[in-house]
Image (tube, rainbow, N blue to C red):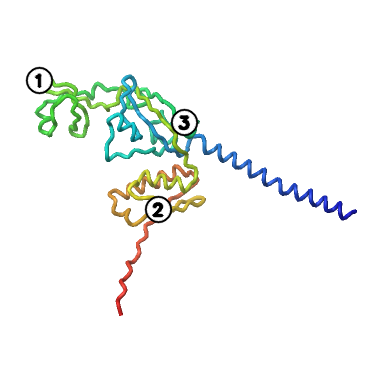
């Protein structure tokens, strides 16, 4: 009889020990899912957007190819894909990034930006009358609506009066209220994926499989491929990669960018 009682006690104990870990695992999965679904300050996300001027609804900036073709804005050399945003880092307008917090994947929101939080108010001192002869000396075509570069300034000819032209050097969107239709396309959670996302942002010419990335507790190591040495301005791009990586992985204290030079193999000689 005592043996049977002992067996029952042992069985009950073993059941209890096998049930507890299962509950803990389910709890962890639920927490992780919530963290990946909602945008928060510091999140690294992909977004699509369409920027319009309020009133006339004219599109001036976008990331979606179909809309670009529909609006007659498609350009073969442009890249149409969701852009990477580190929320709170001003990779987009601050007023847009503030509204991204709390959004979920595939959610779309229309955000209105007043002039003072967009391109700024119009500055009358940036509207200048310039002699047509001066413009012509610099190869400028004199025509209303013509975009020009005069010295270091960029502007547009708005009026022609006799021998002079009125040129507006205000930013094109100055004084205008803007609207952005923004859609969250994805949230990047894994540290190594964050590094790959930053590399694509800064050095889009090199495919992902050419890099090797290692993320440890307080350091990130990026092995650069040899072909990166032939990209113009690569040293500045690498500085950008390092700065962005430290921003999106705040626990990292340093970023090592490694370039390995191997001695060329000697061709085998025939015996």
Query: What is the x, y in percent for residue 158?
Result: 19, 22
Q: Most extreme residue toward the right, as rendered?
A: 1
Asked which secondary structure carries label 1, the reply is: loop
Which residue is labeled 3 in the image? Answer: 107
On the image, which quarter does residue 124 sit in?
top left
Q: Comparing marks 1 and 2, which lies closer to the viewer?
A: 2
Circle number at residue 162:
1
Query: What is the x, y in percent for residue 198?
Result: 40, 45
Whether 145 is drawn above or below 217: the answer is above
Whether 160 is drawn above or below 84: the answer is above
Query: What is the x, y in percent for residue 66?
Result: 34, 33
Instruction: From the viewer's perspective, tell me whether residue 58 is left or right of residue 5.
Output: left
Instruction: From the viewer's perspective, tell me whether residue 8 is left or right of residue 135.
Output: right
Q: Are marks 2 and 3 in contact (CB under 8 Å)?
A: no
Q: Residues within 10 Å of mark 3 (few under 14, many from 20)?
A: few
Q: Are marks 1 and 2 in contact (CB under 8 Å)?
A: no
Asked which secondary structure carries label 3, the reply is: loop
Whether residue 40 is visible to the viewer of this picture, yes or no, is: no
Q: Most extreme residue toward the bottom, as rendered?
A: 271
């Amino acid at each position: 009889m005592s043996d049977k009682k002992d067996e029952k006690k042992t069985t009950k104990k073993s059941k209890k020990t096998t049930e507890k870990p299962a509950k803990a695992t389910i709890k962890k999965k639920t927490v992780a899912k919530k963290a990946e679904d909602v945008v928060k300050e510091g999140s690294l996300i992909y977004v699509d957007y369409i920027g319009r001027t309020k009133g006339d609804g004219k599109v001036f900036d976008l990331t979606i190819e179909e809309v670009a073709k529909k609006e007659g804005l498609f350009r073969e050399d442009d890249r149409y894909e969701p852009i990477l945003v580190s929320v709170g880092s001003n990779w987009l307008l601050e007023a847009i990034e503030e509204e991204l917090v709390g959004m979920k994947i595939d959610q779309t929101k229309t955000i209105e930006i007043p002039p003072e939080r967009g391109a700024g108010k119009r500055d009358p001192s940036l509207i200048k009358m310039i002699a047509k002869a001066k413009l012509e000396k610099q190869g400028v075509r004199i025509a209303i609506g013509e975009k020009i570069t005069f010295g270091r300034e960029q502007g547009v000819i708005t009026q022609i009066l006799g021998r002079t032209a009125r040129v507006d050097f205000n930013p094109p969107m100055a004084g205008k209220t803007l609207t952005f239709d923004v859609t969250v396309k994805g949230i990047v959670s894994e540290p190594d994926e964050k590094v790959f996302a930053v590399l694509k942002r800064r050095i889009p010419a090199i495919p992902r499989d050419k890099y090797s990335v290692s993320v440890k507790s307080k350091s990130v190591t990026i092995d650069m491929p040899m072909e990166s040495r032939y990209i113009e301005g690569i040293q500045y791009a690498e500085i950008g990669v390092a700065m962005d990586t430290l921003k999106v992985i705040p626990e990292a204290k340093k970023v090592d960018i490694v370039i390995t030079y191997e001695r060329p193999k000697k061709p085998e000689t025939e015996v």
